[in-house]
Image: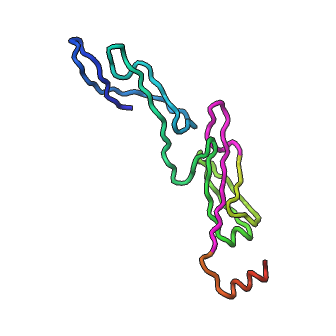
C-alpha cells in the first residue's frame, strides 16, 4: 500500500515522503476487519502515529458472502424445477461440483455443501450454498394451462 508519511527533517521542518507498506491480507478476512501498523504513520511531537486499515470486500460477479458462507444463486426454468435437472457449478476455489436433482425444486430453496466456503479464522471453512431461483413463464396459452391443470 502506497501512502504519504509526514515527518520532520533534521532541521525540524515538516516534510512529506512517499512510503510503501506491505500487508498480508489473510483469506477469509471479513469486511470491516482492522489492520493496525504501530508507529508507521505521521510523525507528531509525541512520536509516530499508528496507521489503521479497514478491510473492504470487492463485489464478486457470481457469489455473495454471508458470514463464512459463499452463496451462488442458480436460475432454473419451471420445467427444470418440476421435472429435474443436472448442472455443474464452480466453487469460489475453482472446484467443479455436479448437482443432480430429480425434482421438484422449490423456489428459494437451498442446498448446502460443507467446507467449500470462506476460510475461517480458527481453521476450517464455511459452507457453499446454492440458492435456487425458479423462473416462471411470463405467459401461458390456453392449451398449456389446460394441460397443466390435467397433470397437476
Q: Of helix, strand and loop, which mostly describes the magenta segment?
A: loop
Residue in the image at 45% along x and 23% along y: 37
Q: Is residue 115 left or right of residue 7?
A: right
Q: Please, is residue 86 above or below residue 42 in the view?
A: below
Q: Is residue 1 left or right of residue 102?
A: left
Look at the image and say whether residue 11 sits in the magenta stretch: no
Front-lying residue, 151 or 44: 44
Q: Bounds of the magenta span? A: 114-136
Look at the image and say whether residue 122 sits in the magenta stretch: yes
Front-lying residue, 55 or 88: 55
Q: Position of residue 3 (x, y in %)?
A: 34, 30
Q: Is residue 64 left or right of residue 98?
A: left
Residue in the image at 24% along x and 20% along y: 14
Specify how the rendered protein is coloured. rainbow
Q: Quadrant of residue 142?
A: bottom right
Q: Position of residue 24 (x, y in %)?
A: 49, 30
Q: Position of residue 51 (x, y in %)?
A: 41, 25
Q: Please, is residue 115 above or below residue 43 in the view?
A: below
Q: Please, is residue 126 above or below residue 82 in the view?
A: above
Q: Quadrant of residue 100?
A: bottom right
Residue in the image at 44% along x and 28% along y: 52
Q: Please, is residue 105 above or below residue 62 in the view?
A: below
Q: Position of residue 71 (x, y in %)?
A: 62, 51
Residue with the most extreme top position: 10
Front-lying residue, 50 or 22: 50
Q: Is residue 56 left or right of residue 133?
A: left
Residue in the image at 76% along x and 82% along y: 149
Quarter of the figure that contains the C terminus: bottom right
Amino acid at each position: 500500500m502506497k501512502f504519504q508519511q509526514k515527518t520532520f527533517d533534521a532541521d525540524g521542518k515538516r516534510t512529506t515522503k512517499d512510503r510503501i507498506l506491505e500487508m498480508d491480507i489473510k483469506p477469509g478476512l471479513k469486511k470491516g476487519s482492522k489492520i493496525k501498523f504501530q508507529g508507521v504513520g505521521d510523525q507528531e511531537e509525541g512520536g509516530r502515529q499508528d496507521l489503521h486499515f479497514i478491510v473492504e470486500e470487492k463485489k464478486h460477479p457470481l457469489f455473495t458472502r454471508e458470514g463464512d458462507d459463499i452463496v451462488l444463486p442458480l436460475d432454473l426454468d419451471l420445467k427444470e424445477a418440476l421435472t429435474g435437472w443436472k448442472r455443474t457449478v464452480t466453487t469460489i476455489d475453482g472446484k467443479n461440483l455436479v448437482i443432480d436433482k430429480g425434482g421438484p425444486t422449490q423456489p428459494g430453496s437451498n442446498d448446502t455443501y460443507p467446507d467449500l466456503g470462506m476460510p475461517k479464522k480458527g481453521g476450517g471453512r464455511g459452507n457453499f450454498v446454492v440458492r435456487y431461483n425458479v423462473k416462471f413463464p411470463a405467459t401461458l396459452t390456453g392449451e398449456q394451462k389446460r394441460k397443466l391443470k390435467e397433470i397437476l
